[in-house]
Image: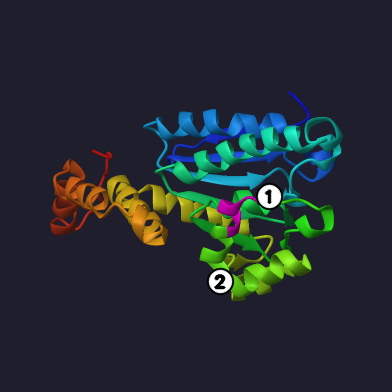
Amino acid sequence: MSEFGLDVERGEDRVAWITVRNPKRLNAIRLEMWRAIPELIATLASDPSVNVCVIRGAGTAAFASGADISEFESVRKDAASAAEYEAVTTTAFDALLGLEKPLIAMIRGACIGGGLAVATCADVRLASTDAQFALPAARLGLGYHASGVRRLVDLVGPGMTAEIFFAALQYDADEALRMGLVTRVLPAGDIEGFTRAYAGAMAANAPLTQQAAKLAIADALADPADRDGAAVERRVAACFASEDYAEGIRAFLTKRRPKFQGK
């Protein structure tokens, strides 16, 4: 096994776990790992045995401490190579954002820079009490892609986004919760058990309903000129026309758990 990479574990509960692994550098994300994300996400998107995905960092010290700065002198050494690097990371973020299935980020320890950018691509962010968050771009002289700034504005508003970028402060889990950067905060010893139960319960729900809701949420956040209400309505109509809808009604009337198939 390589000393760094992205690992995938599929469970019988229809949950896939993606682990960011680079333990020598607090799970910093190397260029090869950014490049691997789109294919990995495409594979999980097309896997009928997976309803929900969870992304986490290896170990307990970090979700991801950012892009791996140790390789910047070779892969991001000038404006041209920096633009190529940005194109790779943009494609990775687009893949994460484009996943139609629910994506949960389980965050322990450092969630910094590019690691935080990955976490903001998730639909739900669960943080442990020992999590720390920061975007140190202003301390490195980096320009930050507009789509990443917009994701933060959508989550925490323009004022907090300005502070995050201008001051490059570090925030603890409670501060992140108060500003809306994370969804829940759990004790460090409980977060994995909670996430497994939480994701498993989510995976048992109707996939078509979740996909329609995810599309509607994205549409609500889009610029008015880019919204596609018709596409959302088609997804809603597909829910009502599905076998899962009929199964949900039967299960409710007979007081049993539904068995959804995503069709």
At 32% from the left edge and 46% from the top edge, which residue is drawn?
207
Q: Mark 1 = which residue? A: 115
Estimate the x, y position of residue 226 in percent, counting from the top left. Answer: 36, 53
Q: In this view, does 113 lie to the left or right of 190?
A: right
- Against 47, residue 190 (above or below) is below
Quarter that holds the C terminus:
top left
At 38% from the left edge and 58% from the top edge, which residue is drawn?
217
- Against 183, residue 250 (above or below) is above
SS for dot 2:
helix
- Against 82, residue 226 (above or below) is below
Which numbered disc, 2 or 1, marks the residue that appears first in the sequence?
A: 1
Quarter that holds the N terminus:
top right
Residue range highlighted in magenta: 145-149
Q: Mark 2 = which residue? A: 157
At 76% from the left edge and 42% from the top edge, which residue is drawn?
28
- Find out whether residue 147 is within the magenta segment: yes
Crowding at label 1, few (<14), some or many (≥20) Cα neighbours within 10 Å? many
At 78% from the left edge and 36% from the top edge, which residue is drawn?
76
Q: Which amino acid does label 1 sit on?
A: Gly
Q: Disc 2 vs disc 1: which is toward the camera?
A: 2
